[in-house]
Amino acid sequence: MRFLWAGLGLVCVGLAVIGAFLPLLPTVPFLLLATVLFARSSPRLHNWIVSHPQFGPVVEDWARSGAIRPRAKRLATLSIAAVFCLSLLLGVGGTVLAIQAIVLSAVLTFIWTRPNG
């Protein structure tokens, strides 16, 4: 079972890295999930992600106080705006745009109401 948790954790880290460059994939949720999976499977991998220079501070901020760093908030906002603008440019239907606007607004509300890391 430990190998399964570790494998899933590595997949989550990979998705988080991809999400850092693609606006459609979230980064932080995958890092948090990887941290939980590593805690269940491998102290070495858990230590690696918590002490990683890029990932560690994000995980620590969230674990300590549910905080998101202002830079991450800005990047998330830009990514969400880019996705919505892309939908507009592609001529997505009005119903889909309305649903997308509601969901993305809820996500932005959640992000911006978290404390700053």
Image (cartoon, rainbow, N blue to C red):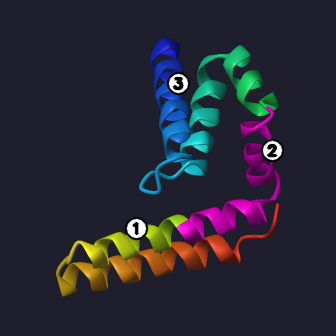
- Residue at image point 69% right, 60% down: 72
Judged left or right of residue 102, residue 96 is left
Q: Position of residue 62 (x, y in %)?
A: 74, 53
Disc 1 marks a residue whose amino acid type is: Val
Q: What mark, if any, has residue 10 been given in the picture?
A: 3
> Which is in the foreground here, disc 3 or disc 1?
1
Query: CA gap, disc 3 to disc 1?
Result: 26 Å
Which secondary structure class fits the magenta region best? Answer: helix
- In terms of secondary structure, where does tag 2 sit? helix
Above or below residue 109? Residue 54 is above
Q: Residue at x 58, y 79 (%)?
A: 109
Local SS, label 3: helix
Dot 2 or dot 1: first in sequence order is 2
Mark 1 packing: few (<14 Cα in 10 Å), some, or many (20+)?
A: some
Looking at marks 3 and 1 on the same chain, the residue that comes earlier in the sequence is marked by 3
Q: Which residue is mark 2?
A: 57
The part of the image, by quadrant, that contains residue 76 is bottom right
Front position among marks 2 and 1 = 1
Image position, residue 79 (x, y; %): 51, 64
Element assignment for label 1: helix
- Residue 62 lies in magenta, yes or no? yes
